[in-house]
Image: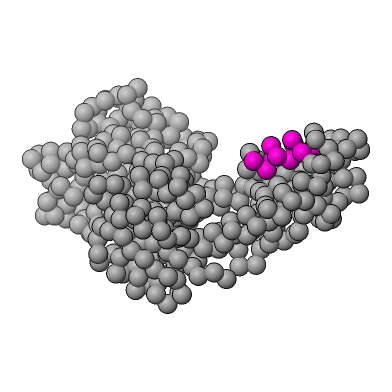
Amino acid sequence: MTERTILLVDDEPNILKALKRILRTDGYKIYTADGGEEALAFLTDHPVGVIISDHRMPGMTGTELLAIVKDLYPDTIRIVLSGYSDLETITEAINEGSIYKFLCKPWDDAHLRTTIKEAFENYELKMENLRLTQELKEKNLELSQKNVENSGLIELVVTHSCNGIIVVDQYNQVVFSNPAALNMLMYNYRVLPGDEFELPYGVNRRTNTVLQRENKSDLSLSIDCRDIIHEGKAAYLITLFDHSDIDRLYQEKQNSAVKLKETFLQMIKAISLTIEKRDVCTAGHQTKVSNLSVSIAAKMGLDNDALEGLKIAGLVHDIGKIYIPSEILNRPGRLNQYEMQIVREHPQVGYDILESVTFNWPIKEVILQHHECIDGSGYPHGITGAEMMPESKIVAVADVVSAMSEYRPYRDAISIEEIIRFISKHRGVKFDAEVVDACTALLKNMAGVKAPLL
């Protein structure tokens, strides 16, 4: 194996020192440059297998440097290591520099070393591919001398195709394979002229298969087969489409979305707990409102996306209570008119707190409207049912039901039967009729037992 040479480019000396310290045990020959101009001057006289460059550097950016390297030294594997991971920077690096990987600062040492190791394997694979391509050209030259038309086809495929292309005769033996096919299959099969073709395929249809590779990620292939005539005889043109990166990126995106959603929900729950810590009399209230809102919505036939939004809205519907002084929140007696006015401002305060936050659901609107009534008698703005969000109507009922079922210093918890009578009395007046009907059905099922929603 030839010596693995790497060039590190960064305008921060400490970064270069840190990278050299991490990589020094991996057996690489390491060179450094403090900018694009110095890197290009070095590359003039020194072949490099892998170049890792910062993006934001004075003079020449990393993207500009790697774009030049791509044109002058196309076989060199190009990696960006940047503290800027915005979509615009990544897109620019991919489009201009055709980079192999985009890594973020601060980096994970193990991931960095693994990425560089795979980059050198990719580079060495390219070099091996060049050797195989030369061997392939020599074999194809023999075929081209027999059939000029076939020679033109092979030259076109070798020069232009990025997909694996293989010609198989009627005895399932390889007649021709392009460099892309050799590159894809070299870990599993030989597909040089004269070899037996071992992959599954169906004539005039597409077949999907996955090839396992030792110490490498699996290779996901789509195999397309078409009838052709080769040297006057029946043959098959097989095209290999590698969608491994697409599958991997999709899975990574799905995993990231799940983790992000879990983190977001944990943050919401933390906010909910923070609010309740200030109001000891209503511990668990927001969770109860959240659970009951979701159950009502499910009873009404709302879809899963709406249920997810209601779950979050219920957990933070009282976030505006952060604004209310603790002595008012925890007072055992009834509030005076001035204190009640402060309390009535918490929906607007909650809306203002989250005004700059973008949600996929109408969370802010629910917070603002959860004390409104469909007859316009609610607060803070006295809007009617026509102006209320459907989700707000659900949380409004869930909030009242939860509050009535909870103990307060100035009263005992109210029974489910009394709660049903109360919301039924205001059905179609203060509360949306459909919401009340769904909630009543749920409460009747809970009557006489410990209610899981309350």
Q: Taking the image as drawn, is residue 288 in sight?
A: no
Q: In which quarter of the image is residue 363?
A: top left
Q: Position of residue 79 (x, y in %)?
A: 42, 55
Q: In which quarter of the image is the N terminus?
A: bottom right
Q: Is residue 3 left or right of residue 334?
A: right
Q: Is residue 377 left or right of residue 323?
A: right
Nearer-the-camera pick, 182 or 18: 182
Q: Taking the image as drawn, is residue 175 in sight?
A: yes
Residue at 82 percent across and 50 percent down: it is 174
Residue at 54 percent across and 69 percent down: it is 2
Residue furthest to the top in view is: 386
Residue at 84 percent across and 54 percent down: it is 194
Nearer-the-camera pick, 355 or 451: 355
Q: Quadrant of residue 210?
A: bottom right
Q: Position of residue 203 (x, y in %)?
A: 84, 40
- Magenta stretch contains residue 373: no
Q: Where is residue 439 in the image (x, y as percent from the top left)?
A: 44, 40
Q: In this view, does 107 lie above or below 176?
A: below
Q: What stretch is highlighted in magenta?
A: 150-159
Nearer-the-camera pick, 417 or 358: 358
Q: Is residue 251 above or below residue 307?
A: below
Q: Position of residue 360 (x, y in %)?
A: 39, 38
